[in-house]
């Protein structure tokens, strides 16, 4: 039983990371109809920035968290302005190619500067144990950090004027322009929020694994699985989908084989889409 | 107040407006008649800044606005209640209205007053304030669209076919409300296929055909014009 509970905790922790990345993707998709494939690579940049600020710069982990989130928010706005905005109104394939270009550029750039995988020390290197369950503090940080950020995002969207404007643009772009919302500003804001969330996920996860130039690749595929399972553009769907995928993966690792964990993730996608082609939740809410 | 001078605009490669000129004075209620595809909606979208004219000039209260973005134009005091309403279907009625006041967030007190006025104009919206806009009936959605357009306190309200697809009784109610809004000091420019109703409440009217103004005159004159009768009133 305690083995099972341990796996559940690991699953929730994996899911937390997925949710933080998938939420950004789903927001961007809802607002701009863009499949932002480079999102995972911005996550990777967040992890490297943490390494620079914390390991090379000697800054405290928690301060580094805020620095990384703020810096990546700016990077996100830059990507929207320089890569996606000029392509607005053009066929989807153009945006897709631009995203692939950005992925290759970022990955090659990082590999050129630092080809080896790096590791970041844990801010609190302890393991808690109670009743047969043992848990590294860092996993707890991922889980609680994700809950706090997800709640903050929900409050921002449901309770503030700018957050509601994000929903308004997602639901009717022309209507939003007509009430005086600047769609460009809201797009930039959405990219800033989404990329800051990805940076937070990277900062939380980095101490648990090596950081490498290709770490964003598999992650973005899974985040897309989640966004599709959840119903494109749905926030609730991304949250539910992220935790479901994390749990499935952790249980697959524990009871089947770690080599097959990704097989499970994508098999679930295929099955869910066969049964419910529109995803678990209605999109764009 | 609003002046269009030889305005040309296109959607894609198709020229929809081929040189439209018109003038609207402060306080007027002016209607725009025209068949489907005459370019009424394009004309309104061009005034609101959603479509940029490639030739000609639009000025509002003496200032050229034809190169401004839609949000700037809203801030200048022009509000468009578009054809098809363009509501936010999964936001509540109240949030839709509050989004209408997006540009006025600094004066919370005045926004609350405008919200009160809109609720007085359309009491059903207050009853349904927590319901999602998408769950309202067609008539209620139209009221919400007009209410939302009023939330920014426009000096000029553009109404694009507000009666489209609504039952006669609801149309009557909406037309009365439009007259009421105009009496409260808002200049109104109204497009309609339902010419009889529109001419009855307007002072003046224009007739648009294939992207050009073909007739203009007092509402009473237009209502008596044989061609207008034949084409738009069906008498």
Image (cartoon, rainbow, N blue to C red):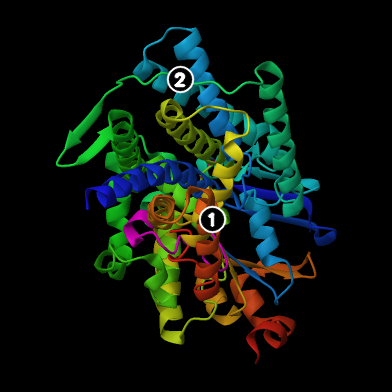
Give me the C-alpha separation between circle 2 and circle 1: 28 Å
Q: Which residues are magenta?
A: B76-96
Residue under the point 76% across and 48% down: A94
Q: Is residue A124 above or below residue B227?
A: above
Image quadrant containing the C terminus of chain B: bottom right
Q: Residue at x 62, y 21 (%)?
A: A116
Viewer-nearest residue: B94 or A65: A65
For label 1, the residue is: A225
**B227 versus B53 height, above or below:** below
Q: Residues within 10 Å of mark 2 (few under 14, many from 20)?
A: many
Residue B143 located left or right of residue A184: left
Q: Is residue B84 magenta?
A: yes
Query: The disc numbered 2 marks a residue on which chain?
Result: A
Give the structural element (helix, strand or loop) at label 1.
helix
- Between marks 2 and 1 in the image, the one whose residue lies nearer the viewer: 2
Taking the image as drawn, is residue A219 in sight? Answer: yes
Q: Is residue B32 above or below residue A63?
A: below
The label shown at residue A120 is: 2
In terms of image quadrants, where is residue A127? top left
Asked if B29 appears above or below A8 in the picture, the reply is below
Left or right: residue B72 compared with residue A89 = left
**Front in this rendered view, residue A269 or A279:** A269
Q: Secondary structure at mark 2?
A: loop
Q: Is residue B80 visible?
A: no
- Image location of residue B197, percent across then percent down: 53, 79
- Percent across and percent down for residue A53 are 48, 13
- In the orientation shown, which residue stands out farthest toward the bottom? B235
């Amino acid at each position: 039983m305690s083995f099972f509970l341990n796996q559940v905790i690991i699953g929730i922790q994996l899911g937390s990371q997925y949710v933080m990345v998938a939420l950004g993707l789903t927001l961007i998709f809802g607002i701009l109809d863009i499949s932002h494939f480079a999102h995972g690579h911005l996550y990777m940049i967040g992890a490297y920035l943490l390494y620079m600020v914390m390991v090379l710069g000697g800054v405290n982990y928690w301060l580094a968290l805020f620095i990384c989130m703020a810096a990546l928010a700016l990077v996100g706005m830059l990507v929207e302005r320089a890569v996606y905005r000029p392509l607005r109104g053009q066929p989807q394939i153009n945006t897709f190619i631009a995203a692939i270009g950005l992925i290759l550029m970022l990955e090659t750039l990082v590999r050129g500067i630092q080809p080896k995988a790096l590791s970041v020390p844990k801010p609190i290197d302890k393991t808690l144990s109670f009743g047969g369950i043992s848990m590294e503090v860092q996993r707890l940080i991922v889980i609680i950090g994700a809950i706090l950020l997800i709640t903050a995002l929900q409050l921002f969207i449901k309770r503030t004027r700018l957050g509601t404007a994000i929903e308004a643009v997602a639901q009717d772009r022309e209507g939003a322009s007509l009430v005086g919302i600047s769609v460009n500003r809201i797009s930039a804001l959405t990219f800033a929020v989404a990329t800051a969330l990805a940076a937070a996920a990277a900062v939380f996860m980095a101490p648990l694994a090596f950081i490498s130039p290709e770490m964003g690749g598999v992650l973005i595929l899974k985040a897309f699985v989640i966004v599709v399972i959840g119903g494109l553009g749905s926030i609730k769907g991304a949250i539910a989908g992220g935790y479901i995928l994390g749990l499935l993966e952790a249980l697959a690792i524990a009871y089947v084989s770690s080599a097959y964990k990704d097989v499970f993730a994508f098999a679930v996608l295929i099955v869910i889409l066969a049964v419910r082609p529109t995803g678990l939740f209605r999109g764009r809410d | 107040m609003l002046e269009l001078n030889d305005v040309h605009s296109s959607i894609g490669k198709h020229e929809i407006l081929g040189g439209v000129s018109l003038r609207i004075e402060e306080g007027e209620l002016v209607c725009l008649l025209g068949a489907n595809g005459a370019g009424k909606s394009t004309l309104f979208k061009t005034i609101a800044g959603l479509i940029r004219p490639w030739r000609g000039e639009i000025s509002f209260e003496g200032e050229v606005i034809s190169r401004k973005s839609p949000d700037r134009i809203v801030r200048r005091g022009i509000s468009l209640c578009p054809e098809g309403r363009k509501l936010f279907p999964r936001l509540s009625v109240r949030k839709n209205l509050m989004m209408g006041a997006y540009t006025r967030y600094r004066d919370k007190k005045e926004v609350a007053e405008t919200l009160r006025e809109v609720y007085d104009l359309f009491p059903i919206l207050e009853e349904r304030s927590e319901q999602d806009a998408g769950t309202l009936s067609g008539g209620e959605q139209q009221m919400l669209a007009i209410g939302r357009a009023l939330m920014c306190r426009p000096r000029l309200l553009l109404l694009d076919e507000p009666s489209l697809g609504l039952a006669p009784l609801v149309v009557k109610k909406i037309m009365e409300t439009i007259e009421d809004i105009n009496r409260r000091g808002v200049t109104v420019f109204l497009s309609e296929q339902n010419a009889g109703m529109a001419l009855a409440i307007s002072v003046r009217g224009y007739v648009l055909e294939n992207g050009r103004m073909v007739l203009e005159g007092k509402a009473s004159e237009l209502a008596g014009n044989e061609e207008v009768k034949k084409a738009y009133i069906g008498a």
